[in-house]
Image (tube, rainbow, N blue to C red):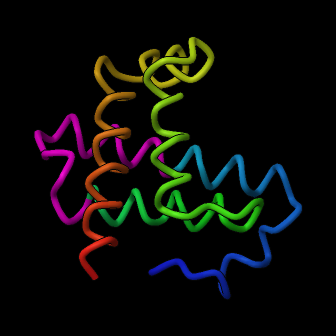
């Protein structure tokens, strides 16, 4: 399902649902990375956009803001530990996918 603000509105304000949806996205990123995909391929871009749209249900999350958050994924020990505990290199893979997604959105 392609996520849009409309079909994510049910998650607004429900921290449990948002956290669960983010965990699913992270799991999907891990599977994609472990399958050998590149962080700038179409599926990675779709996951990055799903992540951004989900965050946008909680607070305004432009592609630029999403990149700033992605920087924390690679530098903040809380995020880094969570992602790297799932798969080595996952934090950078997700951050790179988010950066690539921003570049695509800027061209559109």
Query: Quarter holding the C terminus?
Result: bottom left
Residue 18 at x, y = what percent? 72, 55
Residue 91 at x, y = what percent? 39, 28
Q: Residue at (37%, 50%) from the top-left corner? A: 98
The reply, left or right, for residue 74 in relation to residue 36 is right
Could you tell me how many numbered marks the image carries?
0
Residue 26 at x, y = what percent? 47, 42
64 in relation to 33, above or below: below
The stretch of residues the image draws in magenta is 25-43
85 in relation to 13, above or below: above
Q: Out of 40 and 82, give the one closest to the viewer.
A: 40
Tell whether position 7 is magenta.
no
Q: Residue at (20%, 65%) from the top-left corner? A: 42
Tell whether position 35 is magenta.
yes
The reply, left or right, for residue 36 in relation to residue 79 is left
Q: Out of 76 and 89, give the one closest to the viewer.
A: 76
Q: Residue at (15%, 58%) from the top-left corner? A: 41
The reply, left or right, for residue 32 in relation to residue 50 is left
Q: Residue at (72%, 68%) from the top-left corner? A: 57
Q: Out of 7 and 76, give the one closest to the viewer.
A: 76
Residue 45 at x, y = what percent? 29, 61
In this view, which residue lies farthest toward the right? 13
Q: Main secondary structure of the magenta part?
A: helix
């Amino acid at each position: 399902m392609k996520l849009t603000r409309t079909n994510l509105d049910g998650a607004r304000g429900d921290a449990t649902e948002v956290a669960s949806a983010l965990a699913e996205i992270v799991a999907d990123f891990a599977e994609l990375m472990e399958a050998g995909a590149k962080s700038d391929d179409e599926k990675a871009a779709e996951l990055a956009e799903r992540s951004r749209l989900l965050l946008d249900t909680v607070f305004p999350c432009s592609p630029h803001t999403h990149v700033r958050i992605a920087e924390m994924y690679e530098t903040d020990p809380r995020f880094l530990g969570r992602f790297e505990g799932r798969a080595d290199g996952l934090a950078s893979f997700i951050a790179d996918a988010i950066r690539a997604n921003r570049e695509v959105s800027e061209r559109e």
